[in-house]
Image: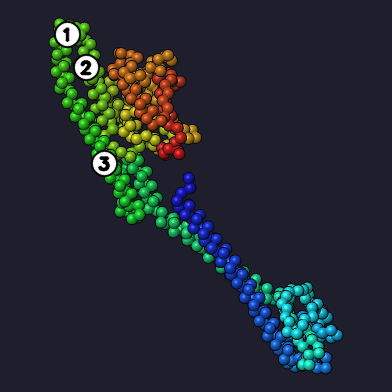
Amino acid sequence: MISIRSKLSLWLSGLIIIATVIGLILFESMLRQAFHDSIINRLEEDLEHIIIASHINAGEIIIDQNQLSSFYKPAYSGRYFQFNSDDQVIRSRSLWDVQLDIELLQHDQTRVWQAKGPKNNDMQLLSIGIGSINGDKVATLTVAQDLSIGRRVFSEVFGTKLAINIAMLLAMIGGIFIILRQSFKPVKHIQVSLAKLRQGEIDALEVTKIPVEIKPLAETYNELLDYTANQIERSRNNLGNLSHGLKTPLAVMQQQVEVLGLSNPQAAEAMQQQLDLIRNMIERKLTAARITGDMLPAAQMVVPRDFEALISTLDKVHHHKNIHCSIDVSDDISRLPIHREDGMELFGNLLDNAYKWANSAVNLTVSQQQQTLTLCIEDDGPGVNDDQISQLTNRGKRLDEAVLGHGLGLSIVKEIVEQYGYQLKFERGDVLKGLHVCIIFANTTPDGSAVT
């Protein structure tokens, strides 16, 4: 989807271009009309001067050359006149050997038109019908002006105006992009802050450098973060208090089971299994609370840092086993698209299961192909038969009662994966020959964000 800054840039640039084009069209039309009006006014003045310098006497047109402008003397000077009557044609010297094709007019009748003239140039012509004093003869006086010089001046003026407008247009478009870039810098700052927030580097958005238009949004987001963090902390504390509070009743029940074992060993053994199940569940929740620690509600899993913390904790928990856990993460992957607390519980369960079954080695790999992010955990334990793989995520199901654990871990893994809409796969490993678990994060980018 196109960004707001790009959309504003395109819209504003489009509006400026349209306004510039409309302005140029209006300017060209007004300049052309002004150019035409100035020529007509000049031709009207030329008509008056020539009429003053001429008269019709005894049916003959007489012109006083001394009263004519010098523009009519050089050949093809660009300004011309011509008298036409039924039996007489008088041309200005500037026409030289060219005779204009003139339509005879009645007395006081006028005509304005354009035609080809000397050197095949366009001319603007103005004609008027002039009668003699006694009214027995009518002649048509035509004045003309070559349009080539005026059009050249028109082209120079309009070309200069066009160049100035294009320069101003480019300057305004550049200014729009610069202004919008500067205006959206605070939004970029928020984007960077959100990335740091997802990585757990900060615990709230900094609102001092945020514009007033979006400051309430940032403040509301910070309030939501605080509320969510408090709710998570309260839930974690309640869980810890509940787990610790159950230890005393469990200790009392353990004593009663030992006493019961003297009189009814079978019932005592059944009770002992249930007590062990409850005790292991409590220990697991306490371990999960210790692993997650104080986490931000908007933070995502950061790789490989969070996996190193998990492995360090599990090395201490399984200190009686010498397990080497290797981490292989692609360089372009920085985060996993999962909340850090859920991720810690999810991968903590998978790695804890791998540590329990492994003999000496555990491999963790994170790779990306196109828009599919894949995380795999493999151990060198005995593995699982193909017909038993489907049972791994059944709640409370354990395939080896000799290994410590209550069997809830993998079912919790399945619930978290399904909650996020990802895929969970179990198979036998090709490298270490143990259990190979893969989580496929579909439609994600290397930085851990989801692709919409």
Q: Tell me, yes or no, if residue 365 can be seen here.
A: no
Q: Which residue is mark 1?
A: 261
Judge by depth and name the residue closer to the eye, 114 or 182.
114
Q: Circle 1: is it few (<14), some (14-19), or many (20+) Cα within 10 Å? A: some
Q: Is residue 156 above or below residue 19?
A: below
In this rendering, position of residue 165 left or right of residue 263: right
Q: In the image, what residue occupies the spot 63% across and 73% down?
A: 33
The residue lying furthest to the front in this view is 135
Residue 345 image point, x, y percent: 32, 29
| Amino acid, disc 2 | Leu
Q: CA distance from mark 2 to mark 1?
A: 14 Å
Q: In the image, what residue occupies the spot 21% across and 31% down?
A: 238
Q: Which residue is mark 2?
A: 275
The residue lying furthest to the right in this view is 87
Of badges 3 and 1, the one in the foreground is: 3
Q: CA distance from mark 3 to mark 2?
A: 36 Å
Q: Is residue 299 above or below residue 119?
A: above
Dot 2 or dot 1: first in sequence order is 1
Residue 389 image point, x, y percent: 41, 17
Residue 266 image point, x, y percent: 21, 7
Q: Quadrant of the C terminus?
A: top left
Q: CA distance from mark 3 to mark 1?
A: 50 Å
Q: In the image, what residue occupies the spot 41% across and 56% down?
A: 183
In this rendering, position of residue 445 left or right of residue 223: right
Q: Could you say which disc has been placed on residue 299 in the image?
A: none
Dot 3 or dot 2: first in sequence order is 3
